[in-house]
Image: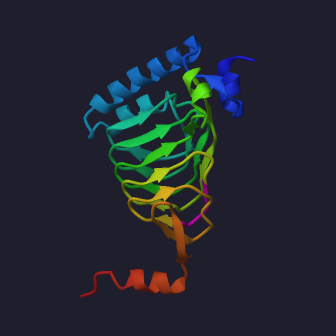
Amino acid sequence: MDELTKMKKGYLYYADDPALIEARSTCKDILFAYNQIPPSHIKERNALLSTLIHAEGKFHIESNFYCDYGFHITVGDEFYANRNCVMLDCAPIVIKDRVLIGPNVSIFTATHPLHHELRRQGLEYALPILIEDDVWIGGNTVINPGVTIHAGAVIGSGSVVTKEIPANALAVGNPIRILRILDEADKRRDLQHFYRD
């Protein structure tokens, strides 16, 4: 079994495998070009980024954007990521529709063995991340390997997501904790911010 297959299956693999190094190098070159394109050239930017990631509709990712491979990333319709988003996509990162990501958010599928002897050998592994529909992730959040964030959840700024987040939850902190489940009262509070003459 080659190292890419091991990586995709969540097994320990050697990150210094020549084929993986080449794939990361190609990704870096494409992202370097992407991050240099003027922000107003949206079609050109999205066309280039679509050579790396799988987009299932309209999306917008601000510069600077970084990932390891790109081919493990799938984003749904109306996806938006603010500046300095980092996705270490050694395993699949699946982001569904209408997800909003604040600035400086990091999404990490890559992880390393706890025991130093295995790390010394250059072994690592990766666990997939799923972010369902209508999730909002506040700025400076870190999402750790293997996490699922269910539909409608809100992750407060500066959080470190270490576990599964239920649907419609408001969750914050380091490590993350569930404050409550959002409901119609939250919607009424939000609607108070509409401009009225």
Q: Residue at x 57, y 27 (%)?
A: 119
Q: Which residues are magenta?
A: 148-153
The secondary structure that dominates the magenta segment is: loop
Q: Residue at x 69, y 34 (%)?
A: 10
Q: Residue at x 28, y 86 (%)?
A: 196
- Residue 53 on image: x %, y %: 52, 34
Q: Which quadrant holds residue 183?
A: bottom right
Is 28 situated above or below 82? above
Viewer-proximal residue, 45 or 135?
A: 135
Residue 152 among magenta residues: yes
In the image: residue 37, left or right of residue 167 = left
Q: Residue at x 66, y 20 (%)?
A: 3
- In the picture, the quarter occupied by the N terminus is top right
- In the picture, the quarter occupied by the C terminus is bottom left
- Residue 35 on image: x %, y %: 31, 32
- Residue 87 on image: x %, y %: 47, 39
In the image: residue 79, left or right of residue 39 = right
Residue 12 among magenta residues: no
Is 110 situated above or below 75? above
In the image: residue 79, left or right of residue 102 = right
- Residue 185 on image: x %, y %: 50, 87
Is 182 situated above or below 63? below
Q: Which quadrant holds residue 149?
A: bottom right
